[in-house]
Amino acid sequence: MRKHIFNAGPCKLPDATLENTSKACLEFGASGQSIMEISHRSADFLSVYEQAIALFKEVLSVPSGYSVLFLGGGASMQFCMVPYNFLNKKAGYVNSGTWATTAIKEAKLWGEVVIVASSEADGFTYYPEFTVPQDVDYIHITSNNTIRGTELLKDIDSPVPLIADMSSDICSRPVDVSKYALIYAGCQKNLGPAGVTVVIIRDEFLKNVVTTRPIPTMLKYQTHVDKESMHNTPPCVNIFAVKETLQWIKSVGGVKEMERRAIERAKAIYDYLEDSNLFRAVVKAGSRSRMNIPFLLKEGREDLEKEFIDFTKTKNIVGIKGHRSVGGFRASTYNACTMDDVNVLLESMREFEKKYV
Ligand SMILES: *Cc1c(COP(=O)(O)O)cnc(C)c1O
């Protein structure tokens, strides 16, 4: 029986993605080959690749003058590639959570980092307000903080190139891509399996690449733009799966519909948490993520933590345990999460609450 999956990443994917990718793994079209076996240079695979790029551009309304890449290495590789390519003297970073902190650590290897704002002192329980400095090579933000459960939910105006890690909220709402110089996202939260990362880069921005140090070929954005993600063998199966998810997003109404669903799911969970006598929300109103919803037991009831996790298991719910660094619980409600999943979770929370309050 299929579980109600609230994993933080990898995570639940649409049935269509699972079904069509499974089929393609056995035989891709009528090629007599698996999508795992086919050459990435074959016309058949190139067509998959081109469809994935075209669908992504369409779904997220990527304007002309931008390149879209599918790379390996995860979002973590982008933590390194961004400063390696673009940190000349000084970069601004917003420290809004655990992943932002990791990105900052990497950037410091290549130049000066200005922490433009941080909510670290308050356990990252809100998205910090910030103004963008004028004297930095770029500003880096994390649009959704997967572990802490805060989200920016707007596309800011920036006087310097704006770079965003959108790993955990990509394609969950319409985005004004024209405001960004570069967006990257590991695909394993909203789009597909782990192992492929989407990068959207403004072609003009490539001119800002640093010239004071050599950049290894594989770490250079220009390499991947020039070779259309085919400098080396791309993650073919993953790209196929992402294409399927994009097709699904488009068929159900696009990112506008993804946003409507995300709002509906998050509202249901947060409304419950507001009224609950046993559970409480962690994140302050105004910063709450629609994708990752952390929650705790009320003070004095923390002893029930393991019991609740075990209880959710009996309800076919998985992935509700909070990140090991913060404890408590977290419901990750990415694109493929349904209201049925959410209702099952809320029913079990109500039932558990009745038992103990
Ligand atoms: C998951 C995640 C990462 C790390 O992604 P990898 O693909 O595992 O490197 C980075 N940033 C954010 C916001 C994430 O959610």
Image (cartoon, rainbow, N blue to C red):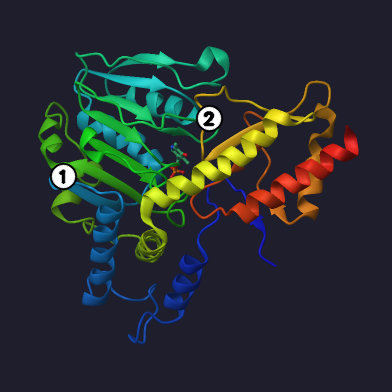
| Residue 225 vertical placement versus 242 (above, below) | above
- Residue at 28 percent of width and 32 percent of height: 163
Answer with mark 2 or mark 1, whichever residue precedes in sequence. Answer: 1
Task: Identify the residue position indicated by label 2 in the image.
Answer: 288
| Residue 50 vertical placement versus 356 (above, below) | below
Q: Position of residue 62 (x, y in %)?
A: 23, 47
Please name which of the two marks, 2 or 1, marks the residue nearer to the observer: 2
Left of 274 or right of it: where is 216? Answer: left
- Ligand 1 lies in quarter: top left
User: Is disc 2 in contact with disc 1, using a CB cutoff of under 8 Å?
Assistant: no
Left of 44 or right of it: where is 310? Answer: right
Q: In what element is the residue under mark 2?
A: loop
Q: In what element is the residue under mark 1?
A: helix
Question: Is residue 307 something that shows in the picture?
Answer: no
Question: Is residue 231 something that shows in the picture?
Answer: yes
Q: Considering depth in this image, is 276 or 35 the residue closer to the camera? A: 276
Q: Residue 184: give its label.
A: none
- Residue at 64 percent of width and 28 percent of height: 326
Q: Considering depth in this image, is 32 or 157 the residue closer to the camera? A: 157
Task: Identify the residue position indicated by label 1 in the image.
Answer: 222
Q: What is the CA distance from the residue labelled 2 to the residue labelled 1?
A: 36 Å
Q: Position of residue 10 (x, y in %)?
A: 53, 51
Kind of residue indicated by mark 2 = Arg
- Residue at 14 percent of width and 48 percent of height: 64
Q: Quadrant of residue 192?
A: bottom left
Q: Quadrant of residue 349?
A: top right
| Residue 272 vertical placement versus 256 (above, below) | above
* Quarter occupied by the N terminus: bottom right
- How crowded pointer 2 is (Cα within 10 Å; few <14, some 14-19, many 20+) is rated as many
- How crowded pointer 1 is (Cα within 10 Å; few <14, some 14-19, many 20+) is rated as some
Kind of residue indicated by mark 1 = Gln
Q: Position of residue 75 (x, y in %)?
A: 39, 41
